Structures are given as C-alpha cells and as structure tokens.
Image (cartoon, helix red, strand yellow):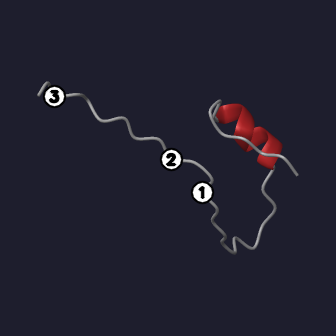
Amino acid sequence: MPKTKATIRIENVVASATLNQKVDLNAVVKGYPSAEYRP
C-alpha cells in the first residue's frame, strides 16, 4: 500500500478577544492574503 502525504486544511476558525482598542480589520486582511473578512 503506497503512502500518501496528508493534507491539512483549517477552515471556519472563529475567535474573540477584548483588546480595549480599535482594530482596522480591512488593514489586517490586506496583510494576510489568505484571510477573509466579510462584515
């Protein structure tokens, strides 16, 4: 039986935090091309 390389893909990660400051999510998405932000 031939070995195959495993493929790992992470989707739909949701996180929350309190930062006590404003964050420009549009600017964050521009810095991470694989990230998505859809308000």
On screen, 39 above or below 30?
below
The quadrant in which residue 21 appears is bottom right
On screen, 25 above or below 5?
below
Residue 14 location (% of width, % of height): 64, 62
Q: Give the number of the disc on residue 13.
A: 1
Residue 39 location (% of width, % of height): 88, 52
Q: Report helix, strand or loop for mark 2.
A: loop
Q: Report helix, strand or loop for mark 1.
A: loop
Foreground residue among 31 and 4: 4
Apparent side of residue 34 relative to residue 38 in the rendered image (left or right): left
The quadrant in which residue 15 appears is bottom right
Tag 1–tag 2 contact (CB < 8 Å): yes
**Residue most extreme to the left:** 1
Badge nearest the viewer, 3 or 1? 3
Sooner in the amino-acid sequence: mark 3 or mark 1: 3
**Residue in view at x 66 percent, y 72 percent:** 17
Tag 2–tag 3 contact (CB < 8 Å): no
Residue 4 location (% of width, % of height): 23, 28
10 Å neighbourhood of mark 3: few (<14), some, or many (≥20)? few
Disc 1 residue type (three-letter) = Val
On screen, 26 above or below 30?
below
**Residue in view at x 67 percent, y 70 percent:** 16
**Residue at mark 3:** 3
**Residue at mark 2:** 10
Q: Give the number of the disc on residue 21.
A: none
